[in-house]
Image (cartoon, rainbow, N blue to C red):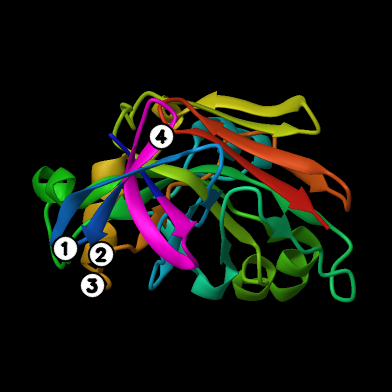
Amino acid sequence: MKIARIEHNGQPAYGYVEDERINLIDGDIFGKYTKTDISVSLEGEKLLAPCVPGKVIAVGLNYSDHAKEMGKQTTEFPVFFLKANSSVVGHEDDIIYPCHYSNRVDFEAELAIVIGKRAKHIEESEVHDYILGYTCLNDVTARDLQKIDGQWARAKSFDTFCPIGPFISDELDPSNAKIQSILNGEVKQDSNTSQFIHKLEFLVSAASKIMTLEPGDIIATGTPEGIGEMKSGDVIEIYIEGIGTLRSYVK
């Protein structure tokens, strides 16, 4: 199934996507809810970020092709970092270029795991019981600031630096899904999640043993080779097989 979060009658609402329509629910997709008789056209609705994460946990250097591209050694344990949840925006929202602070802003296509229920100290065999689904994520990065700071909080956390969407989907095999970034119609990243260094189950289990994962939290699983620069006026799209295309406009 695919889950959308939309603005309906001025309020956020969740629903299931079927045949270019959204069938709305009453309640919380992460808790108790009931299906309603309300169905709206997908084309006529504003898609919001498909969840409101309390935290965004990201993973550095988790594709073998990207590690080779960067000339970095892989690590035994995942390199986790956090992006501010205030950086989250949705499908077809703007990415605001922080031109007073940075001269180099990059795109990074990523598969994001959406946590479905509270998880603490879970084992790899339990992980899929705690996942609601998956969405596209663009780990927007001020690359020059990342190099200056030597750590990643500022470079990764400007407002609008975490587009997610368009849907939460379980209609994919997260261990073998095509992933692309497309800048102004040109494919820049073209890989597959089979290139993961640390597998999805290990990532979620490891993260849960560091910090409690709450419903709606996101784990971004890393980016493949081909990351590159965006400029004002660009259109950047993140495509993942089984989810769809997340589109953003650089301002």
Q: Quadrant of the N terminus?
A: top left
Q: Residues within 10 Å of mark 1 (few under 14, many from 20)?
A: few
Label 4 and label 2: CA atoms lie apart by 25 Å
Between disc 3 and disc 4, the foreground one is 4
What's the residue type where badge 2 is placed? Answer: Pro
Q: Position of residue 149 (x, y in %)?
A: 71, 75
Pointer 1 residue: 31
N-terminal label among 1 and 3: 1
Identify which residue is drawn at 89% across, 62% down: 103
Between disc 4 and disc 2, the foreground one is 4
Segment colored magenta: 5-23
Pointer 3 residue: 212
Residue 157 shows in this picture = yes
Q: Secondary structure at mark 1?
A: loop
Pointer 2 residue: 215
Pointer 4 residue: 21
What's the residue type where badge 1 is placed? Answer: Gly
What's the residue type where badge 3 is placed? Answer: Thr
Label 3 and label 2: CA atoms lie apart by 10 Å
Q: Residues within 10 Å of mark 4 (few under 14, many from 20)?
A: some
Q: Secondary structure at mark 2?
A: loop
N-terminal label among 3 and 4: 4
What's the residue type where badge 4 is placed? Answer: Arg
Residue 238 counted in the magenta span = no
